[in-house]
Amino acid sequence: MWVLVNLAMLVMATVFAGAAAVAAYWLMLRATLELMRPAAVRTVPAVRAGLARGTAQLIRAFDPRRHEE
């Protein structure tokens, strides 16, 4: 009987530790993505004279900062 109780406690401890590990991994992944976001969203200033025809309108249409609002 005590063997089954010990086995059940071991299984419950393993499940709890696994859930804690998954939660910690998820939080670290979210924090990493939040810290990387400013580097990924940074845009390079466009030189107006060097743009092909219609490029300025495309830049304004697909600007990620415009769609955050």
Image (tube, rainbow, N blue to C red):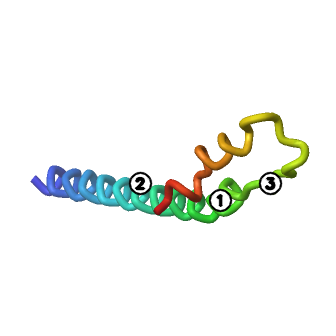
Q: CA distance from mark 2 to mark 1?
A: 21 Å
Q: Which of labels 2 and 3 is toward the front?
A: 3
Task: Give residue 47's position: percent from left, percent from top.
Answer: 87, 51
Check disc 1 and report the residue beneath it: 36
Which of the two labelled residues, at mark 2 and mark 1, occupies the earlier sequence position?
2
Left or right: 7, with 31 as reference point: left
Left or right: 53, with 28 as reference point: right
Q: Provide the secondary structure element on which disc 2 rests.
A: helix
Task: Give residue 57's position: percent from left, percent from top.
Answer: 66, 43
Task: Give residue 18's position: percent from left, percent from top.
Answer: 37, 53
Q: Amino acid at mark 2?
A: Val
Q: Provide the secondary structure element on which disc 3 rests.
A: loop
Q: Amino acid at mark 1?
A: Met
Seen from the viewer's position, the closer of residues 22 and 37 is 37
Q: Provide the secondary structure element on which disc 1 rests.
A: helix
Check disc 3 and report the residue beneath it: 44
Looking at the rendered structure, which numbered label has been put on residue 22? 2
Q: Residue at x 64, y 49 (%)?
A: 60
